[in-house]
Image (cartoon, rainbow, N blue to C red):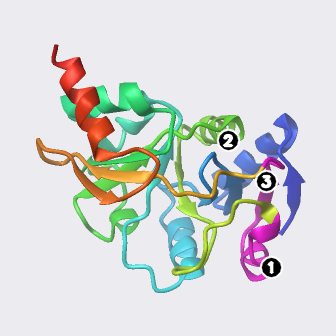
Amino acid sequence: MTVLRATRNNIMVASRIVKRGGLVIYPTETVYGLGCNPFDVQAVKRILKLKGARKKPLPVLAASISDADKIAFISQNGKRVAAKFWPGPLTLVFHKKPTLPDVVTFSGDSVGLRIPDNDVALHLISLCGGLLIGSSANRTGGEPPRTVQEITDELKEMVDVVLDGETPAQGRPSTVADLTSEKPRILRDGPISLKEILTALALSDQ
């Protein structure tokens, strides 16, 4: 495991590691993320083993809405909400496309996606092909880390590279909203409320 300052060159180094099937820990605006290529089944299995006892689908971070569209059927409501809140701390759940391996979603038919509001994360995701697993960098049930120092040594040793963004993350995980049906449903409370989402949809209809 190597901890690297998140310079442009080191982000490029980390992206090459991901493309070779490696695991990376990286900063986002909410918490530090644990990522790999979502299309690499063996890498995803490594993340699941590292997380331990996880029963929920893994979220995926995208560099753009067009990247998100590669693995999900994004509804018109979804596009409206994404246009308002992405990049930002809102994970949107859509029906997944067959292109995304079932291991990511535990064979479920939906996937959580977001575009993070963090330059290091966006640069890394772009260099990795536009999509990256975005689970929090902690064991299941543990506290999501705000800094590299808060990541356990055990976890650091189990990944291939750690990018240190140096500025602490906010520490509050993203809101998760299910948009697989017409009416949005909150699956996890976070920085963005259901009221804000509904307001964005109402305004876009005017």
> Dot 1 corresponds to which residue?
153
Q: Earlier in the sequence, mark 3 or mark 2?
A: 2
Task: Assign a secondary structure to mark 3.
Answer: strand
Query: Is 150 within the magenta?
Result: yes
Q: CA distance from mark 3 to mark 2?
A: 10 Å
* Badge 1 element: helix
Would residue 73 be seen by someone viewing this image from the given angle?
Answer: no
Residue positioned 55% across, 78% down in the render = 51
Can you name the residue that lies furthest to the left here?
Answer: 182
Q: Residues within 10 Å of mark 1 (few under 14, many from 20)?
A: few
Figure quadrant of residue 49: bottom right
Amino acid type at image mark 3: Leu
Which residue occupies the foreground of this view, 112 or 20? 112
- Range of residues picked out in magenta: 149-167
The residue type indicated by label 2 comes to Leu
Q: Position of residue 178 (x, y in %)?
A: 25, 51
Numbered mark located on residue 163 in the image: 3
